[in-house]
Image (cartoon, rainbow, N blue to C red):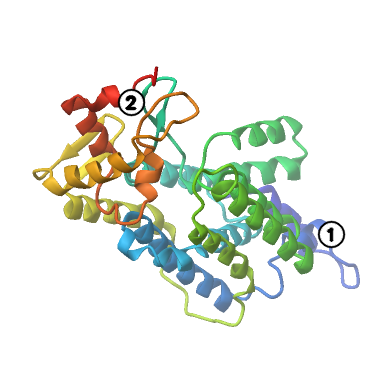
């Protein structure tokens, strides 16, 4: 597709010998250390580590995969920056992929929490990472054209809840605008990763899980430089994100026998008795927990992160509370 960058690059190529290229054209080139073999390796690693991360998220017994999976986001971010600089972004296709991916993404990683003020479970919708890529691309175009309204709109769009949130945008901005200052790039990304780890997993938390320090492993992604691999099929890489989400969703439903949606949990097989037994164990452990809202109720977030709480989604617990009259336990403590 036509892009204003194309004119800049062509103009630079037509400069007479002995005249240096404009700074804008130089900045649009790929960093000299990123050759095609390394870019191909990053693409393979991004796909593999993303699958590992999502599998580790869905199944507690495979949670160790998430250590490797921490490399996925920065790898994809760096690859997307390379694509932006190449001028080969098709924004319409990107948005279509994002929209298609949102359905399996929301069903697999639905975010829900107990709101003591409303005394009910709230489903918090979050956009998948492809939408974040599209928003950042809009920002780069607006900055390049010095379109102040576009810049304001792009920054405002970054407030929409999206996978990785501000950490994603700071990471891509670092890779994009500090591409020729490696020391500054690595330093800013490391600080951003450390801040995301602290504020995302440790700040103001009732229970500290030190395993979340694994997020710091993401700092190592930009240092993967010595591996070279053949190029993956362009359609495989382009549509891998929605494709792998759909496959994971089908497998997850087949294994667990249920599907959790904002409209409730749908069981495709009889709900196992161990669901209730496991719920009872954790309910007794936390029934005395009093949250800031003055309500006594099992902290669902703790249940989901607790070791051994495998294969039981919070949606099924909510269903049991509603059907068996346990909702009174979540009422006002007075």
**Residue 315: quadrant of the picture:** top left
Question: Going 40% across and 67% down the picture, which residue do you hit?
Answer: 64
**Residue 251: quadrant of the picture:** bottom left
- Between 320 and 206, the residue placed more toward the observer is 206
Q: Relative to residue 191, is residue 268 depicted above or below?
A: above
- Residue identified by numbered label 1: 23
Q: Relative to residue 70, is residue 93 depicted above or below?
A: above
Question: Going 74% across and 63% down the picture, which residue do you hit?
Answer: 187
Residue 309 visible in image? yes
Question: Going 18% across and 42% down the picture, which residue do you hit?
Answer: 276
Q: Earlier in the sequence, mark 1 or mark 2?
A: 1
- Between 77 and 258, the residue placed more toward the observer is 258
- CA neighbours of label 2 inside 10 A, class few (<14), some (14 to 19), many (20+): some
Drawn side of residue 66 relative to residue 204, left or right: left
Label 1 vs label 2, nearer the camera? 2
Residue 218 coordinates in the image, percent (x, y) = 57, 64
Residue 92 coordinates in the image, percent (x, y) = 49, 43
Name the element at disc 2: helix
- CA neighbours of label 1 inside 10 A, class few (<14), some (14 to 19), many (20+): few
Residue 229 coordinates in the image, percent (x, y) = 49, 80
Drawn side of residue 71 relative to residue 33, left or right: left
- Residue identified by numbered label 2: 330
Name the element at disc 1: helix
Drawn side of residue 160 relative to residue 116, left or right: right
Distance from disc 1 to disc 2, alpha carbons, whole Å, reads 62 Å
Q: Residue furthest top?
A: 334
């Amino acid at each position: 597709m036509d892009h204003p960058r194309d004119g800049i690059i062509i103009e630079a190529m037509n400069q007479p010998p002995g005249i240096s290229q404009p700074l804008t054209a130089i900045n649009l080139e790929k960093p000299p250390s990123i050759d095609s073999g390394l870019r191909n390796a990053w693409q393979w690693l991004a796909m593999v580590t993303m699958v590992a991360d999502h599998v580790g998220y869905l199944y507690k017994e495979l949670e160790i995969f998430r250590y490797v999976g921490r490399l996925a986001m920065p790898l994809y971010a760096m690859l997307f920056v390379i694509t932006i600089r190449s001028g080969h972004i098709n924004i319409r296709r990107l948005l279509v992929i994002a929209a298609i991916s949102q359905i399996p993404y929301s069903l697999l990683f639905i975010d829900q929490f107990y709101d003591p003020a409303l005394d009910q479970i709230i489903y918090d919708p979050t956009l998948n990472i492809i939408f974040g890529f599209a928003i950042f691309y809009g920002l780069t175009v607006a900055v390049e054209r010095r379109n102040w309204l576009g810049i304001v709109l792009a920054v405002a769009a970054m407030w929409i809840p999206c996978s990785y949130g501000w950490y994603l945008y700071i990471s891509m901005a670092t890779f994009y605008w500090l591409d020729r200052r490696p020391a500054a790039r690595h330093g800013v990304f490391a600080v951003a990763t450390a801040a995301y780890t602290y504020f995302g997993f440790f700040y103001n938390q009732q229970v500290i899980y030190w395993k979340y320090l694994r997020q710091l492993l993401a700092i190592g992604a930009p240092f993967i430089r010595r591996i070279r691999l053949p190029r993956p099929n362009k359609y495989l890489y382009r549509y891998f994100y929605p494709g792998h989400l759909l496959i994971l969703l089908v497998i997850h439903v087949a294994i667990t026998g249920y599907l959790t949606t904002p409209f409730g949990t749908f069981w495709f097989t009889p709900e196992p008795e161990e669901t209730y037994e496991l719920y009872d164990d954790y309910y007794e452990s936390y029934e005395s927990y009093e949250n800031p809202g003055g309500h006594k109720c099992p902290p669902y977030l703790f249940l989901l992160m607790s070791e051994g709480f495998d294969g039981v989604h919070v949606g099924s617990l909510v269903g049991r509370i509603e059907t068996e009259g346990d909702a009174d336990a979540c009422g006002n403590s007075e």
